[in-house]
C-alpha cells in the first residue's frame, strides 16, 4: 500500500460507458474516455494519482468498494442512478471508510424529484452537481485538501 496518500479512485456507475450518447445538455456530450482523460490531467495538477473504474453492474460496484481501502486513499463517486436508491452501494461506501466526494455532471437537484435524494448523504465530504466536467476538478481539489496533498 502506498504511503503517499494521494491515490483517488474515480468510480462511475451505470450508463457511463455510453456517456457520449446521453443528452449533451445534461451530460456534456463527451465520452467516458474523454472525461477520464480530462480528470487524469486535473488529478496530476492536484498532486493526485487517479484510478478509474466503471461498471453497469451494481454488484461489481459494491465489490470494488469492498476492495477500495487496498487500492486508494480517497474516492470520487458518480454512481449515476444508483446514487438515488442503492442502499447496497451506500453500505459498501460506508464500510470502505475513505474520504469521498459525490459528483454529478447535471444539476440533480433541479431535475426529477427522485434525483434529489442521495443515499450517500452523510457518507461523503461534499456533493458537487450541475458543474459538468468542472465538478470533477472541484472534487479533486476537495480530496487533495482532505488528504493533505500539496500540488
Image (cartoon, rainbow, N blue to C red):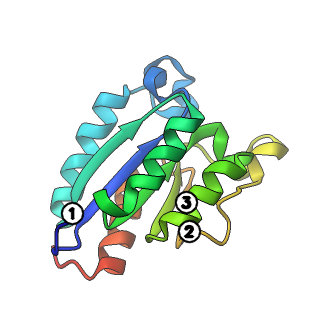
Question: What crowding class fits label 1: few (fewer than 14 Cα within 10 Å), some (14-19), or many (20 or more)?
Answer: many
Regarding residue 121, the answer to whether it shows in the image is yes
Rounded to the nearest angstrom, the CA distance separating label 2 from label 1 is 18 Å
Residue occupying image coordinates x 57% and y 37%: 59
What residue lies at 44% left-to-right and 24% top-to-bottom? Answer: 17
Q: Is residue 96 above or below residue 34?
A: below
Residue beneath label 2, please?
124
Q: CA distance from mark 1 to mark 3?
A: 20 Å
Determine contact: label 3, label 2, CB under 8 Å. Answer: yes
N-term mark: 1 or 3: 1
Position of residue 33 measured from the top left corner of the image (x, y, whole percent): 30, 29
Looking at the figure, which quarter contains the N terminus?
bottom left
Against 51, residue 144 (above or below) is below
The residue that disc 3 covers is 93
Label 3 Cα neighbours within 10 Å, binned few <14 / some 14-19 / many ≥20: many
SS at mark 3? Answer: helix
Residue 23 screen position, x and y as percent: 57, 23
For residue 135, say whether it is visible.
Answer: no
Which residue bears the numbered disc 1?
48
Upstream in the sequence, badge 3 or badge 2? Answer: 3
Measured as percent of width and height from the top left, residue 32 is found at 37, 30
Please tell me which residue lies in front, 83 or 39: 83
Residue at the image point whose x is 34% and y is 54% from the top: 9
Front label number (1 vs 3):
3
The foreground one among 34 and 65 is 65
Amino acid at each position: 500500500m502506498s504511503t503517499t496518500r494521494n491515490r483517488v479512485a474515480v468510480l462511475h456507475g451505470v450508463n457511463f460507458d455510453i456517456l457520449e450518447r446521453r443528452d449533451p445538455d445534461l451530460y456534456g456530450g463527451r465520452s467516458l474516455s474523454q472525461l477520464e482523460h480530462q480528470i487524469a490531467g486535473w488529478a496530476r495538477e492536484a498532486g493526485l494519482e487517479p484510478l478509474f473504474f466503471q461498471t453497469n453492474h451494481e454488484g461489481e460496484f459494491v465489490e470494488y468498494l469492498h476492495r477500495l481501502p487496498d487500492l486508494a486513499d480517497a474516492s470520487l463517486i458518480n454512481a449515476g442512478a444508483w446514487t438515488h436508491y442503492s442502499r447496497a452501494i451506500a453500505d459498501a461506501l460506508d464500510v470502505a471508510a475513505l474520504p469521498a466526494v459525490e459528483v454529478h455532471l447535471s444539476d440533480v437537484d433541479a431535475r426529477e424529484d427522485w434525483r434529489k435524494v442521495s443515499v450517500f448523504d452523510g457518507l461523503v465530504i461534499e456533493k458537487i452537481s450541475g458543474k459538468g466536467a468542472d465538478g470533477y476538478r472541484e472534487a479533486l481539489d476537495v480530496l487533495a485538501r482532505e488528504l493533505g496533498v500539496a500540488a
